[in-house]
Amino acid sequence: MKHVLRPLPLALTLLVAACATAPVPEAPPPHAEAPSSQVPDVAAAPAVPQAAVPVTNVWDRLRGSFAMADCDADPAIDTWARRYTHSPKRFEAQMQRILPRLVYVEESAARHGVPGEFALLPWVESRFRPVPPDRNRAAGMWQIMPGTARHMGLSMSRGYDARLDLTESTDKVMALLSHYHDYFQDWRLADYAYNAGRYGVERLVNREGAPPAEPAVPTLPVRAGTRAHLVKLMAIACVVREPERFHVTLPTLDEDHQLVAIEVKQRLPLKQAARQAGLPLAALADINAGYRNGVIDTRHGGRLLLPRRQAGQLRTALLAQAVGDPSERVASVSAKPGLPDLGDGDAPATRKAEHIPATPTAEATGQPRIHKVRPGDTLFELARRYRVEVAQLKRWNHLRGNAIRIGQKLRVSAPD
């Protein structure tokens, strides 16, 4: 690990581990994996009968962004990879079901500069299932504890839980992992911190020293479950690296089934949205599990994810409802798969509408705009919010890394 001093990352964001810190139980045998019926198969809808639909091959992008060791770095990696693929057909079916989510997560990882291995992290945590909340336990496909969610700025209420919101939770987790790497300068330690907490890992590093590049799985005296967490992540990445080694074929996703975002400008029952989109309610609710009461609430972003083909159908239906009142803009489709629509007046997914700055633009006043950092803010989110580049924020504020601190005042518009 490079010994480079970096600014401390967000204090509150990094107080606790992102997933459950209770002792991890022994890994279940292969046959104990979640039954396939638990995740609606949104990628298996009938293909468009006209011309061939372009496909998305996420696997090459993932391989090209991997940052950790390969299959032969540790015997445990190969062992777990073979457990995952002991039934090749079942593994392929699982991958086909999770592929829309995986493509979405990979895009978020790329935007945050996080390696491809971490796009596979929900496989280790939950097999990409939106695990419902249960008292004070971890929830969502990222398995985020309630206390961690609060420090990350993820809302939790009876009607809405951002831990189960694919858009909200993924963006926050990728920002958190990026901050961990800024601090430790080692993606392996970033994974340890995600599982066990930053401060625990920090104490170990201070006492034992930074781990060398070899062995690939650091020998720091962490809990067995924390070490296994990293091994499992490297194992599923191993399968992606060399699928032929495990006699599996990785699926592709046609663009009609790629997840895109729709901005809903008024409360909308999921049941109505499913009917207008031509999508089974169970499938739509599973993709948008954050809306726990079955209603898309504009107080929590009003963002709905669904396959591209059905998104177009729903958008047409919603716009048709507004024909009588042209000023009522009820929905818009995101410009890119899985990315928020940043058209005029649209609030970014990671912020509530009331946080949108109401002051005139810097161009109108002639004064630079200043933002005071709040809990959960990241450079990436601020760049989206103020429609500038991350590199510009760094240059204007003389930042060397991505870390910012609560209360820090940042220039978010061009200097005069």
Image (cartoon, rainbow, N blue to C red):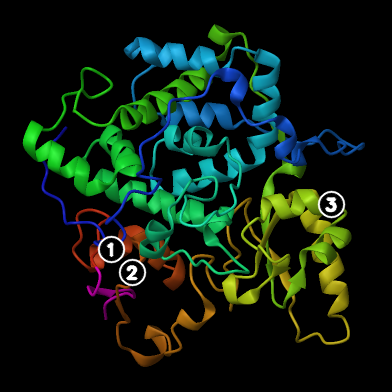
User: What residue is at 25 percent from the left and 47 percent from the top?
Assistant: 198
Assign the N terminus to one quadrant of the image.
top left
Among the two numbered marks 3 and 2 on one chain, the one whose residue lies closer to the N terminus: 3
Percent across and percent down for residue 271 are 82, 63
**Marks 2 and 1: in contact by CB < 8 Å?**
yes
Q: Secondary structure at mark 3?
A: loop
Q: Circle 2 — which element?
A: loop
Residue 348: image location, x then y, percent: 52, 68
Say whether residue 244 is left or right of residue 318: left
Q: Are marks 3 and 2 in contact (CB under 8 Å)?
A: no
Residue 52: name its quadrant: top right
Among numbered discs 1 and 2, the one appearing first in the sequence: 1
Residue at the disc numbered 3:
279
The CA span between labels 3 and 2 is 37 Å
Q: Nearer the viewer, mark 1 or mark 3?
A: 1
Q: Secondary structure at mark 1?
A: loop
The residue shown at (23%, 75%) is 407
Mark 1, residues whose alpha carbon is within 10 Å: few (<14), some, or many (≥20)?
A: some
Q: Distance of mark 1 from mark 3, alpha carbons? A: 40 Å
Is residue 13 rendered to the left or right of residue 140? left
Of the residues under marks 1 and 3, which one precedes in the sequence?
Answer: 1
> Which residues make up the magenta segment?
406-416
Q: Is residue 70 left or right of residue 41?
A: left
Per the image, is 410 magenta?
Answer: yes
Which amino acid, by three-letter code, is at mark 1? Answer: Leu
Mainly helix, strand or loop, the magenta region? Answer: loop
Q: Is residue 190 above or below residue 290?
A: above
Looking at this view, is 350 or 280 the one in front?
A: 280
Which residue was labeled with disc 1? 12
Q: Which mark is residue 375?
A: 2
